[in-house]
Every structure is written in structure tokens, then in C-alpha cells.
Amino acid sequence: MENKLQSTVESGDRGQDPQDGTEDLHTLVASSKILYEKNQTIRCPFFEGDVTLNADGFNHLLYKTNRLPRNVKAQLLKLRLLKKALRIIQKAGTVQEYRVKIEKFGKVSKDGFTKTKQVEYWAFHHIVGEQKKFLIRVIVRRIGDGKPHFWSVMPHGKIERQKLYLEGIDEELE
């Protein structure tokens, strides 16, 4: 299965500019969803186990945490970086960022309280691209004692003053 992922992830992925606007959003969402559903888990050396690809992570590429859709440029960028993100998870041996938060889960109960859980975030940074090099950050999340799962991918800063996108893209971890 790992070889199948490797070939799927690497095909047509080298040197593409994530800002290249040749793909339609609906086509990109459909092809990304197929890739995402084909590979339900990815072996990650850092965790010495699997990282799950679940619906939460895919939805986070398209929607913010408050369930509002991301703008189209942000969705296109995150979806174009998805193949690279899966490859980075496969090779990640060192974590660059680590955060722990207590977050609300579920609905407010009758007594007015909301359940909370500890949530951990790991960020793996990687320089990608051949002609145009840029740094991306891949986020893996774990809720409570659950399994780590893919959460997000985003550009992280500039290399050689290169802008990855125009205005309007939120770089939110949340």
C-alpha cells in the first residue's frame, strides 16, 4: 500500500507552482477527495505508526473551524499542496512545532457546560519545488488519546522573498 501511495502522490507533482490557476476548483476537490479516500492511513516515521486521513482533515482544507468556507484562493492552494503534504508525512522524522490546547467538543449540555479535550498539534516543515522553492507546513492533530490524523497544509513564509499567493489567504492553524 505504501508503494501505491508513493506512486499516487508523486505522479504529476514535481515542480508545479501551487499558484498556477489552470485547475477548476470542483475538479481539484474531486481529484483530491479520490486521492484522500484511496489512502486512509499513511505510515509516519516520527510517530512510528500511522497517521489517519479522515473527513475532519479534508473538510479543514475547504472550511475554517467556524464552518465558514475558506475563500477560493485558499482552497485551491491547500488542495494543490495536498499531494506534497502526504509525501511529507511519509518522510517526517523531526517535528518543527508542537502545541497542546484544551478545546471544546460537542454541544453545550443542559447544565450549560461544554466538554473539553486536550488536543495536540504537530507541524512538519519542508522545502518543496525544484525551480521555485517554497516552505510548507503540514499539521497533524490528535484529540485526547485518539489516533493522530492529518489536519492541514499551508505555506509557511517566503524563501528568497517569493510570494506564494496574493491577498486574502488565512494562515490559521485553528
Image (cartoon, rainbow, N blue to C red):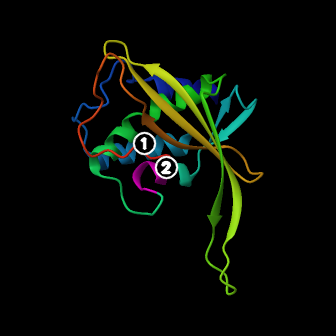
Left or right placement of residue 125 versus residue 171 in this view = right
In the image shown, does 30 or 76 lie closer to the viewer?
A: 76
| Residue type beneath disc 1 | Ser
Secondary structure beneath disc 1? helix
Q: Is residue 60 magenta?
A: yes
In the image shown, does 65 or 4 lie closer to the viewer?
A: 65
Residue plotted at (32% across, 44% down):
169
Using the image, tell me which numbered label, if any, was put on residue 32.
Answer: 1
Secondary structure, magenta segment, majority class:
helix
The quadrant where residue 90 appears: top right
Q: Is residue 19 magenta?
A: no
Residue plotted at (38% across, 18% down):
129
Mark 1 burial class by Cα count in 10 Å: few <14, some 14-19, many 20+: some
Give the answer, above or below, for where 97 lies relative to 135: below
Q: Which image quadrant: the N terminus?
A: top right
Residue range (magenta): 58-64
Instruction: Please give the residue where the numbered disc 2 appears in the rendered image.
Output: 58
Left or right placement of residue 25 versus residue 53 in this view = left
The answer to whether the residue labelled 2 contacts the one labelled 1, judged by CB atoms less than 8 Å apart, is yes
Q: Earlier in the sequence, mark 2 or mark 1?
A: 1
- How many numbered dots are placed on residues in this image? 2
The quadrant where residue 133 appears: top left
Residue 50 in percent (x, y) is at 70, 36
Secondary structure beneath disc 2? helix
